[in-house]
Image: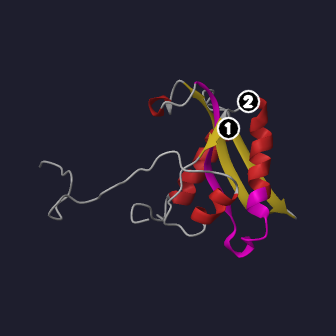
Amino acid sequence: SPFARMVPALEREFRQRLLYLWADEDVDRPPVIVVAERAGEVLAMAECYVETLPGWLSNYRLPDGNYGYLNSVGVRSDLRGLGIGRLLVQGVFEQLAAYEPLGYALWFTYSNPLSSKFWPHLGFRPLWTQYQRRRGIAGTPLWHAEG
Protein backbone atom coordinates (compact mmCIF):
# COMPACT_ATOMS: atom_id res chain seq x y z
CA SER A 1 0.00 0.00 0.00
CA PRO A 2 1.35 3.46 -0.77
CA PHE A 3 -0.14 4.65 2.54
CA ALA A 4 1.71 2.22 4.81
CA ARG A 5 5.43 1.97 5.30
CA MET A 6 7.95 0.63 7.76
CA VAL A 7 9.48 3.27 9.97
CA PRO A 8 12.38 2.85 12.41
CA ALA A 9 10.24 3.67 15.45
CA LEU A 10 7.56 1.10 14.58
CA GLU A 11 8.99 -1.77 16.62
CA ARG A 12 9.56 0.47 19.66
CA GLU A 13 6.02 1.84 19.48
CA PHE A 14 4.55 -1.63 19.04
CA ARG A 15 6.47 -2.90 22.06
CA GLN A 16 5.15 0.06 24.09
CA ARG A 17 1.60 -0.77 23.00
CA LEU A 18 2.08 -4.38 24.09
CA LEU A 19 3.32 -3.24 27.51
CA TYR A 20 0.26 -1.02 27.80
CA LEU A 21 -2.04 -3.90 26.84
CA TRP A 22 -0.35 -6.36 29.19
CA ALA A 23 -0.70 -3.83 32.01
CA ASP A 24 -4.46 -4.13 31.36
CA GLU A 25 -4.94 -0.36 31.54
CA ASP A 26 -7.45 -0.27 28.69
CA VAL A 27 -10.60 -1.54 30.40
CA ASP A 28 -12.82 -0.62 27.44
CA ARG A 29 -10.92 -2.93 25.09
CA PRO A 30 -9.90 -6.14 26.84
CA PRO A 31 -6.58 -7.16 25.25
CA VAL A 32 -5.99 -10.59 23.79
CA ILE A 33 -2.46 -11.43 22.71
CA VAL A 34 -1.78 -14.86 21.26
CA VAL A 35 1.76 -16.01 20.53
CA ALA A 36 2.92 -19.10 18.67
CA GLU A 37 6.37 -20.15 19.76
CA ARG A 38 8.74 -23.07 19.47
CA ALA A 39 11.51 -23.59 22.01
CA GLY A 40 11.08 -20.02 23.26
CA GLU A 41 11.31 -18.51 19.77
CA VAL A 42 8.34 -16.44 18.58
CA LEU A 43 6.97 -17.75 15.29
CA ALA A 44 3.79 -15.69 15.08
CA MET A 45 1.76 -13.24 17.12
CA ALA A 46 -1.70 -11.69 17.12
CA GLU A 47 -2.55 -8.57 19.12
CA CYS A 48 -6.32 -8.24 19.39
CA TYR A 49 -9.04 -6.75 21.57
CA VAL A 50 -12.77 -6.70 22.13
CA GLU A 51 -14.77 -3.77 20.78
CA THR A 52 -18.20 -3.18 22.29
CA LEU A 53 -20.95 -1.40 20.38
CA PRO A 54 -22.44 1.07 20.42
CA GLY A 55 -19.09 2.66 19.99
CA TRP A 56 -16.27 2.45 17.49
CA LEU A 57 -18.21 0.82 14.61
CA SER A 58 -21.71 2.03 15.47
CA ASN A 59 -21.74 4.42 12.53
CA TYR A 60 -21.48 1.37 10.25
CA ARG A 61 -24.86 0.06 11.48
CA LEU A 62 -23.58 -3.11 13.06
CA PRO A 63 -25.79 -4.55 15.80
CA ASP A 64 -24.82 -3.59 19.34
CA GLY A 65 -22.67 -6.14 21.12
CA ASN A 66 -19.10 -7.39 21.35
CA TYR A 67 -16.81 -7.80 18.34
CA GLY A 68 -13.35 -9.31 18.24
CA TYR A 69 -10.89 -6.99 16.51
CA LEU A 70 -7.74 -8.55 15.06
CA ASN A 71 -5.42 -5.57 15.15
CA SER A 72 -1.95 -6.93 14.37
CA VAL A 73 -1.45 -10.46 13.11
CA GLY A 74 1.81 -11.73 11.72
CA VAL A 75 3.71 -14.92 10.99
CA ARG A 76 7.46 -14.95 10.51
CA SER A 77 8.07 -14.68 6.77
CA ASP A 78 10.11 -17.90 6.49
CA LEU A 79 7.28 -19.90 8.13
CA ARG A 80 4.29 -18.72 6.12
CA GLY A 81 2.18 -21.29 4.34
CA LEU A 82 2.61 -23.95 7.04
CA GLY A 83 -0.73 -23.41 8.81
CA ILE A 84 0.69 -21.37 11.69
CA GLY A 85 -1.47 -18.35 10.83
CA ARG A 86 -4.61 -20.49 10.83
CA LEU A 87 -3.70 -21.93 14.25
CA LEU A 88 -2.92 -18.45 15.55
CA VAL A 89 -6.32 -17.09 14.46
CA GLN A 90 -8.03 -20.16 15.94
CA GLY A 91 -6.27 -19.34 19.22
CA VAL A 92 -7.60 -15.79 19.02
CA PHE A 93 -11.14 -17.09 18.46
CA GLU A 94 -10.81 -19.39 21.45
CA GLN A 95 -9.56 -16.58 23.68
CA LEU A 96 -12.26 -14.14 22.53
CA ALA A 97 -15.08 -16.70 22.92
CA ALA A 98 -15.52 -15.71 26.59
CA TYR A 99 -16.71 -12.27 25.38
CA GLU A 100 -19.39 -13.86 23.16
CA PRO A 101 -18.51 -11.83 20.04
CA LEU A 102 -21.15 -11.29 17.39
CA GLY A 103 -18.37 -11.28 14.80
CA TYR A 104 -14.78 -10.36 14.08
CA ALA A 105 -13.29 -7.38 12.28
CA LEU A 106 -9.90 -6.50 10.86
CA TRP A 107 -8.31 -4.15 8.36
CA PHE A 108 -5.88 -5.20 5.70
CA THR A 109 -4.57 -3.77 2.48
CA TYR A 110 -6.28 -5.69 -0.29
CA SER A 111 -3.33 -5.05 -2.59
CA ASN A 112 -1.21 -7.16 -0.20
CA PRO A 113 -1.12 -10.51 -2.04
CA LEU A 114 -0.69 -12.50 1.19
CA SER A 115 -3.53 -10.86 3.13
CA SER A 116 -5.94 -10.80 0.21
CA LYS A 117 -5.71 -14.61 0.03
CA PHE A 118 -5.26 -15.49 3.71
CA TRP A 119 -8.26 -13.72 5.27
CA PRO A 120 -10.87 -14.83 2.70
CA HIS A 121 -9.49 -18.37 3.05
CA LEU A 122 -10.42 -18.17 6.75
CA GLY A 123 -13.97 -17.03 5.93
CA PHE A 124 -13.56 -13.26 6.26
CA ARG A 125 -15.61 -11.26 3.75
CA PRO A 126 -15.58 -7.54 2.86
CA LEU A 127 -17.91 -5.38 4.91
CA TRP A 128 -17.16 -2.06 3.22
CA THR A 129 -14.54 -0.56 0.96
CA GLN A 130 -12.47 2.47 1.87
CA TYR A 131 -10.62 4.57 -0.66
CA GLN A 132 -7.81 7.00 0.05
CA ARG A 133 -6.13 9.67 -2.01
CA ARG A 134 -2.96 11.50 -1.10
CA ARG A 135 -3.03 14.30 -3.68
CA GLY A 136 -5.65 16.67 -5.03
CA ILE A 137 -6.93 16.86 -8.61
CA ALA A 138 -3.87 18.51 -10.17
CA GLY A 139 -1.33 16.70 -8.01
CA THR A 140 -1.62 19.27 -5.24
CA PRO A 141 -1.85 18.12 -1.62
CA LEU A 142 -5.39 17.70 -0.31
CA TRP A 143 -4.43 19.74 2.74
CA HIS A 144 -1.49 21.92 3.66
CA ALA A 145 -0.30 23.88 6.63
CA GLU A 146 -0.63 27.63 6.53
CA GLY A 147 2.59 29.33 7.54
Residue 123 at x, y = what percent?
68, 52
8 shown above or below 142: below
Residue 46 at x, y = what percent?
69, 52
4 shown above or below 19: below
- Seen at 66% across and 37% down, the residue is 103
Residue 37 at x, y = what percent?
82, 60
Is 68 contained in the magenta span?
yes
Q: Which mark is residue 31?
A: 1
Q: Nearer the viewer, residue 62 or 49?
A: 62
- Seen at 78% across and 40% down, the residue is 95
- Seen at 41% across and 50% down, the residue is 130
> The magenta stretch spans which residues?
64-86
Q: Amino acid at mark 1?
A: Pro
The secondary element bearing badge 2 is classed as helix
Q: Nearer the viewer, residue 9 or 45?
A: 45
Which residue is denoted by mark 2 in the rendering? 99
Q: Nearer the viewer, residue 136 or 61?
A: 61
60 shown above or below 127: above
Residue 53 at x, y = what percent?
56, 26
Residue 107 is left or right of residue 98, and the answer is left
Is 33 contained in the magenta span?
no
